[in-house]
Image (cartoon, helix red, strand yellow):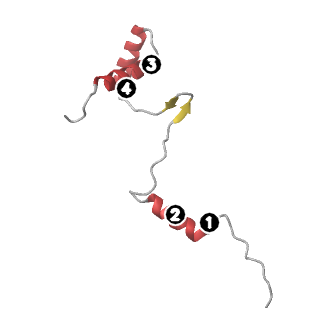
Amino acid sequence: MAITSRPKSSNAPSQEQAQIDKFINDAPDGLKAEKRGVRKGQREQITVTFDTAIIAQLDDLAQHEGLSRAALIRMAVRQLLDKGAQVGG
């Protein structure tokens, strides 16, 4: 009886396994969606879309208060969260 070495195992998944994993992860109940924001220290940058009329009002108010648009939005969101706002109720 001859002694043979073990076949080398591949750390990379096979093409078929990669396709199976992709199919499973793309399902609605697959892996949790990754956060898409960009970390900047203790903050995370996100993208929010507003109507141009709202942006103009935000800019006017921010300038009047001596704040940046981002600071004004952060303050508004913080006040909303502290107040305990309820959606749909």
- Residue 70: % across, % down: 45, 21
> Which residue in the structure is indicated by mark 2?
21
- Residue 66: % across, % down: 44, 9
What's the distance in space between the residues labelled 4 and 3, CA to CA? Answer: 18 Å
What's the distance in space between the residues labelled 3 and 2, CA to CA? Answer: 42 Å
- Residue 50: % across, % down: 37, 29
Mark 2 or mark 3, which is nearer the start of the sequence?
2
Viewer-nearest of labels 4 and 3?
3
What's the distance in space between the residues labelled 2 and 4, CA to CA? Answer: 42 Å
- Inspect the image, locate mark 1, and give the three-letter code of the amino acid beneath it: Pro
Seen from this angle, which residue lies furthest front? 1
Q: Is residue 25 left or right of residue 82?
A: right
Q: Is residue 7 above or below residue 10?
A: below
Mark 1 or mark 4, which is nearer the start of the sequence?
1
> Residue at the spot x=74%, y=76% of the render?
6
Q: Secondary structure at mark 1?
A: loop
> Residue at the spot x=73%, y=72% of the render?
8
